[in-house]
Image (cartoon, rainbow, N blue to C red):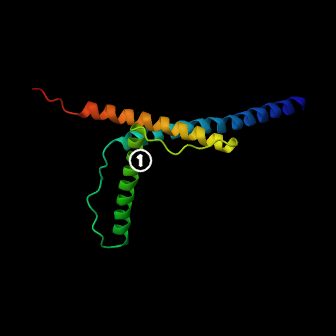
Amino acid sequence: MKTASLLSLIAFATISTAAGAAPGATDEARAEAAQQHAAAARAAGLRPFETLEPEVRISDTDAARRAAAQRNARQAHDSDLFEVMRGGAGIKPAPITVTDTDSAVAVAAQQLREQSLRAEYAECVRVQAATRPVIKL
């Protein structure tokens, strides 16, 4: 009787430990996937915008949705590229005055954003330099 109870206790402990380890691994996998997705999005944002579909002729509701999606994608790309170019040119947003913890967090986030924009600008310049044709005289 004691052996059966001890084995069931060990089995329960093993199952609960395994169940407890899974969410941590899932969170790590999600975080890693999010980082990979963000890196891919940054790389895609530095390339010129090219639609994968031909121009859409609006003839029905679905075509209107596709045309709107194309327009929205182009506007989002242009907006992101504009922010990268502004950051690379040294244009900074209005400074935030630190008055409490929330504003300090906002300042830190603003500084991280500026660093990110400068890094993306440097990558954009590097990519453009690498793809620029060399003219020999």
Q: Is residue 17 above or below residue 74?
A: above
- The residue at 18%/29% (across/down) is 134
Placement of the N terminus among the 4 image quadrants: top right
- Percent position of residue 29, x then y: 56, 37
- The residue at 85%/32% (across/down) is 4
Q: Which residue is mark 1?
A: 80
Q: Is residue 1 above or below residue 106?
A: above
Furthest residue toward left: 137
Q: Which residue is more in the foreground, 37 or 116?
A: 116
Instruction: Determine whether the residue tagged by mark 1 lies in a helix, strand or loop.
Output: helix
Furthest residue toward right: 1
Q: Which residue is more in the foreground, 28 or 55?
A: 55
Q: Amino acid at mark 1?
A: Asp
Q: Is residue 106 left or right of residue 6?
A: left
Q: Is residue 12 left or right of residue 64?
A: right
- Percent position of residue 42, x then y: 42, 40
Q: Is residue 57 left or right of residue 94?
A: left
- Percent position of residue 9, x then y: 82, 33
Q: Quadrant of residue 81?
A: top left
Q: Which residue is more in the foreground, 117 or 20?
A: 117
Q: Is residue 126 left or right of residue 135?
A: right
Q: Is residue 126 visible?
A: yes
Give the total of numbered labels: 1
Q: Is residue 30 visible?
A: no
- The residue at 70%/38% (across/down) is 19
Q: Quadrant of residue 70?
A: bottom left
